[in-house]
Image: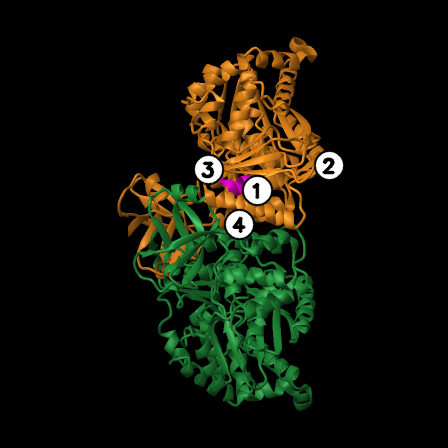
Chain colours: A green, B orange
Amino acid sequence: MKIIPVDVSASVNVIFLPKKVAKDLGIIEHDRLVLKVKNYQIICVVDLINGDKILVSKNVADKLKLDGPFDAELEVLKKPLALNYVRKKLDGKKLSEEEINEIIKAIVNDELSDVEKTYFVSACYCNGLSDDEIVNMTKAIVNNGKHITFNGIVVDKHCAGGIPGNRTTMIIVPIVAAAGLKIPKTSSRSITSPAGTADVMEVLAKVDFDVDDLKKIVNEANGCIVWGGGVNLAPADDKLIKIRQVLNLDPTGLLLVSILAKKYAVGSKYVLIDLPVGETAKMSLKEAENLADYFIKIGEMLGMKIKVIITDGSQPIGNGIGPALEAIDVLKVLMQSKDRPLDLEEKAVEMAGMIFEMVNLEKFGKKGRQLAEYILKSGLAYEKMKEIIKLQQGNVFEPRQIEEKLGKFVYVYRSKKKGKIRKIDNKKIAELAKIAGNPFDKYAGIYLYKHLNDSVAFDEPLFKVYSNSELKIKEVEERINFYENKNEKIIEVK
Amino acid sequence: MKIIPVDVSASVNVIFLPKKVAKDLGIIEHDRLVLKVKNYQIICVVDLINGDKILVSKNVADKLKLDGPFDAELEVLKKPLALNYVRKKLDGKKLSEEEINEIIKAIVNDELSDVEKTYFVSACYCNGLSDDEIVNMTKAIVNNGKHITFNGIVVDKHCAGGIPGNRTTMIIVPIVAAAGLKIPKTSSRSITSPAGTADVMEVLAKVDFDVDDLKKIVNEANGCIVWGGGVNLAPADDKLIKIRQVLNLDPTGLLLVSILAKKYAVGSKYVLIDLPVGETAKMSLKEAENLADYFIKIGEMLGMKIKVIITDGSQPIGNGIGPALEAIDVLKVLMQSKDRPLDLEEKAVEMAGMIFEMVNLEKFGKKGRQLAEYILKSGLAYEKMKEIIKLQQGNVFEPRQIEEKLGKFVYVYRSKKKGKIRKIDNKKIAELAKIAGNPFDKYAGIYLYKHLNDSVAFDEPLFKVYSNSELKIKEVEERINFYENKNEKIIEVK
């Protein structure tokens, strides 16, 4: 039969069958066919169409290394074993190591349709995952993905936060790498926040590298800050995340799997996890405490030493929000500029110190923090960051290179009264930054003049919004008015 | 922007966006865009592609009545409200009438992607539905679909069974219609069984009609037997069923909704439900009893009188399995042939009698059954069936018209010993019929020579398999040998 590739759907192997053909083959939508071309074969999920031509999504043709229309044999395939296990999990039963591996393997090979993957995510969400299931899924994801080994001690950090401006990674990585530890850091891009670490790093350098690049950079500089999606360390997890994003689902089990698989894949033995808590943070203190115990236990089962710190997430960290403004904050800390954000510096030094202490108590004693401080203050961290930026093909080393590109349209929000800052609403601040253009417009964002407990005079600026679009600045203003009319405070002064 | 229609995906409005375009618009996969063409607009779900052209699925172009490439404006849409409620249900909370209606409306309008619909089905499966939710969903499906009103008393029957050969509908409809009651019966095609009632009726007549046709046929003949999928009475339910089929999920709540919505839409006030139970039936006695209570309660809430009979599902009903062979059974009962299957006749007469008693106790007293018997024996039912067949543009009225078309390749399975039939495995019989070609090959199937408790001599035929494919008959033989080697009985003789 003649098959025509068509440039649609890149995430599942799809074959589009005319309804008549499907009827003759005795199959229904979401069934599976094996497409056989000479010595190759590939499993595709069936989508029914009204036309009379058989089409396949381009990724199928790519995998077969075919360009135009081609001939193939079609064979009806029984439902993959993996689906029995998806059903089993949906029915609230526990899955074995083999069963989980079967599901993850099918996901990596694009043999499960979006519907089937969604059933799996729902099952994990509604019925939860046992500790063994979490460990087995983490291993299955790594075994069906990539695995890197480094010489030396490999450490990592992660923030399960969502606090605007919390860019400690870009300070911790150079400090830790300067001390000779390996820290192959992969970070995410923003989905629903103004900026992910990958977006911020991208203001300074390239972040889209493959596994081999990552290995090379880390072997040279001890550290990197690259985009996890590009490295594709845990392809099954990336595919599950796409499904979870549809409803913004973060079921604890899958969240742990997602975070730990990426650490496990690069052989990290020591991992520091930052869980910010607060009224407008992602988590409450209680949730964070539960999650911390969970992380430590699962880490042990995976042979990782995990330390969790619960941090103050009641306000943004640093002054800038949005990729460019956050990158400026980071460079200022590394360069030890006078106007650097001290809250960001303090948090990064504290965390880097903890990593030092985790790795070798005897050598650093309680002095991890002092070492971190020394590396930062002496300029060693900044030198290391410049090395990493260069290795990542970047050429932005100073704040002024970024400042001159900031959004031309600005709006300054001023205090309506004299007093002290009592509350800053992370969510509203993030929302305004997104209205201004983040994360897609890197040079949009918000600069915060004040933090909690700072004193303000009447009419003193509280924050400044930057955007490249006059329309967007107007929308920001409208949104601010909307909150003021409802008497909902973005920043509360009392 | 220039948009190109492409003949893929018929069940959701899809727009295929090059990744670059999506990034510029600030949207991710499964987000939604409004496509604006002159005065029309349509909501599409986003699929990301690697190419550089913007494509839409053909159903979108069809809805806009456009043929070739066209110009349109794109507007990013917030996630529909319905998704908040899907999430709410996934979190185990109850949904209000308005919330359910919002979800069903979005499904009917193809505004929810397959992933989103799957989340909803999973939520209903894992967390169950309350009585109010079932009632509200039934109403929402009907309100967002079609609604027919008939003069007179409207009755219906339904079998939630899956017992091979259980074709009572095609006998009950003509009996009941001949008595002057309205019975606008919509039936399903087989998905996983050898035949659905619509497949069997299709051996005699057309079954694919729209609502207006259905109304006309029923107003003329009092009854019809058409394919529910064609009538499209409950489009939201049909879309949910497609998602459920992927894992063969029959969550009780959605099952009730699915059955009752179709009855509610045609204004049925009296509904008889047949729940066959048995070792190899779909349900155990306990499950059937629970379901029965459920049906009656929900029926009351919907203003329907529902009666449930729990029947013997320990063996196939009638002699034929597969569309053609079951149609022969039905015609033989209606014509009162000497060799008609008496078990099928008995069950149909019993059920028709119950319907008469439900409708009007005073008029028929305990004599519902006698009336049903009279209508059948007198030939009135057969006359009515011929009228229905003609109105449904059919011309098959006698078994011999079917018999001459039965599959040419046959295999006769004989008893290995003398004794009595102790067990018949419904599932294995159904499986063999499907291997022989059912339901797609209507003239394939199985003829059962014996039923439970019948005596058999050594080497006496137990059943005969028909197929149009020599290969398939060989596969049937192989499968039978497979079971014999494992000492699993298809039919147990002792």
Q: How far apart are the two marked residues, 2 and 3, measured between alpha carbons?
A: 36 Å
Does the magenta run of residues contain B256? no
Residue A352 lies in quadrant: bottom right
Q: Residues within 10 Å of mark 1 (few under 14, many from 20)?
A: some
Q: Nearer the viewer, residue B289 or B34?
A: B289
Does the magenta run of residues contain B435? yes
The residue positioned 64% from the left and 13% from the top of the image is B360
Give the x, y percent position of residue B87.
57, 49
Give the x, y percent position of residue A197.
49, 71
The residue labelled by disc 1 is B431
Q: Nearer the viewer, mark 2 or mark 3?
A: 3
Which amino acid lies under the numbered mark 4 shown in the image of this protein? Lys
Give the number of the disc on residue A486.
4
Which amino acid lies under the numbered mark 2 shown in the image of this protein? Lys
Give the number of the disc on residue B441.
3
The chain holding disc 4 is A
| Helix, strand or loop under label 2 | helix
Give the x, y percent position of residue B322.
53, 34
The chain holding disc 2 is B
**Quadrant holding the C terminus of chain A:** bottom right
Which amino acid lies under the numbered mark 3 shown in the image of this protein? Asp
Residue stretch rendered in magenta on the structure: B431-437
Disc nearer the start of the sequence (2/3): 2
The chain holding disc 3 is B
The residue labelled by disc 2 is B286
